[in-house]
Amino acid sequence: MDNLAIARILAEIGDLLEIRGDNPFKIRAYRNGADTLADEPSAAAAMTEAQLQQLPGIGRDLAKKIREIVDTGDTAFHRELLEEFPPTILDLLRLPGLGPRTVRQLYTELDIRTLADLETAARDGRLERLRGMGPKKRELILKAVQTRQQYAGRHLLPDMHDIAAALVAALREDLPAADIVPVGSLRRGCETCGDLDLLVSGAETTAIDRFLGYRLVEEVLARGDTKASVRLWGGIQADLRLVPAESRGAAMQYFTGSKAHNIALRDRALQRGLKLNEYGLFRIEGGERLAGATEEGIYEALGLAWIPPELREHRGEIEAAEARQLPRLIDLADLRGDLHSHTTATDGRDDIETMARAAKEAGLRYLAITDHSQSLTMSNGLDERRALEHARRIREAGSRIDGITLLAGIECDIRADGTLDLADDCLAQLDYVVASIHSGFAQEAAQMTDRLLRAIENRWIDTIGHPTGRKLLKREPHKGDMTAVVDAAARHGVALEINCQIDRLDLSDVHARLARERGVRLIIASDSHSQAGFGVLRWGVQVARRAWIGPGDVLNTRPPDEFLASLRRHRTRGGASAPSA
DNA sequence: GCCGTTTTCGGCCCGACTGTTTTCAGTCG
């Protein structure tokens, strides 16, 4: 049982307790526990109760319940709650505008258990007989049910970024004097975002009207003097907050979040007799205002270095900021090479030379061409003979083009049993090998782990590509034990890839941070299939920043010669040594 | 349910908006 599965049960207990109307702090305790587990890279299943209690927000009771869940698949407390409430009412809780109180009321007074029940009750007029329920609320609920599928879910970070950029540009045209910044999960660089938060300062309240008048606004959900919400074309909700210029920093801090980071920051303020809100930092006694115009001022007044938004997840950043030991995070400009790309030899759209020139244009000094191996028949994967012939052409093209070093590589398939798709003597003749899984994602954990470990043991592998195989919003990561994979990669000097494809971003921030902490070298690679494909590198850099990664942790920040020398195949034979400096 | 050199008991973040009210509860971020 993996951490995410355990976390889901704890979170569901939290939701059910909320519907029941239980102690809100108990509810938060379950949610904190769930968050902790979801963020924890080591397997909770392998921990003792004492070890579990070392994790933040997990005490004696939760540790006991987690052990029970690991050992039996569930906990008696969770089953007890499910007897009290049907699990389908949790679907109701996820509807916008419906909270725990209303859901409980719907269930106890009208026996509404499912979305279908709710829709029926809304249509036949029973809903309006409830206290606090009028025609507007009825319409809201009906609409929420109907648009559930259409607008379900979250959006990929790059999609959200583009939408935000267009909206900000339009607003800037209307409000030249105003300061407009995206905040929220977008500013923190989260891999997916639920909605779009914009902060405007130094503008009149007419800014709200400009926002509501944006050409892509499909529906106004709420409007006030300082806050408005709309649904944009395509179903994305956008929220705008208007604050006075002197509160800009406090508001940026507040609306950037994360919630956990903000709670910790407020707690820190309280310990110092201060109150932090979106308008500033104030003394509780007397109300004197200490900071608010800039984020730096807020953090400084709390005894902290300014914390980059990507780190604000309450994962140790406050302690690091206090000790003035925040890492220097990697930037896109630090990348000097790209190590994963495809050409027309397999499923790419452009030839070797076009890709090379585009990479150079993108500011890169080296590029590995890594087309697919034979198992990927639908992508016209290369067998040994074609792979070597392709390598010859890559080297020939490299000799013709100035200003960029081409590496003859391959993306070699890892077969179901962990063997590689091409013979060792073929891989040995290439400059760079990234090994990836493209099929058999549903394998059980043990088999998947063995498969990856076996691939890592092959001495001609330089890197594992998109290590968890996830597709954001589509496919869950495979069940393999990533801690074991990370440790094996560290042992054997194999690099792990942060694949920059926008629906992969694989490794995730959590796993990338684990890899870094265990001394694994990382590669940030585009996996581009066309000359336009190098633009995605910025998203992999974003993941790396969220993983506390600096330029020194990433192999392809090194100049070409140094990079090549650092590859496992060029280091001392015998493999299992620690990475050389 | 968690947590702790101000506490092992008594705290636990806080403000805006909506819809239904006639002073506020519920939801959201």
Image: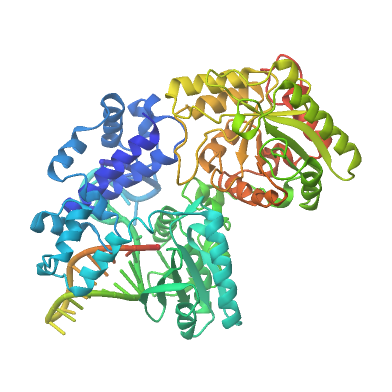
- Residue A213 at x, y percent in the picture: 47, 80
Q: Residue at x 25, y 43 (%)?
A: A13
All told, the count of numbered labels is 0
Q: Residue at x 46, y 84 (%)?
A: A205
- Res A304 visible: no
Left or right: B21 with respect to A408?
A: left
Residue extending furthest toward the top: A574
Q: Nearer the viewer, residue A103 or A47?
A: A103
Looking at the rendered image, the quarter that the C terminus of chain A falls into is top right
Looking at the rendered image, the quarter that the N terminus of chain A falls into is top left
Left or right: A245 with respect to A397?
A: left
Q: Nearer the viewer, residue A497 or B22?
A: A497
- Residue A304 at x, y percent in the picture: 54, 56
Residue A40's place in the image compared with A576, above or below, is below
- Residue A339 at x, y percent in the picture: 71, 38
Q: Nearer the viewer, residue A473 or A351?
A: A351
Q: Nearer the viewer, residue A380 or A230?
A: A380
Left or right: A71 with respect to A452?
A: left
Residue A570's place in the image compared with A203, above or below, is above
- Residue A456 at x, y percent in the picture: 61, 22
Left or right: A100 with respect to A403?
A: left
Q: Quadrant of residue A390?
A: top right
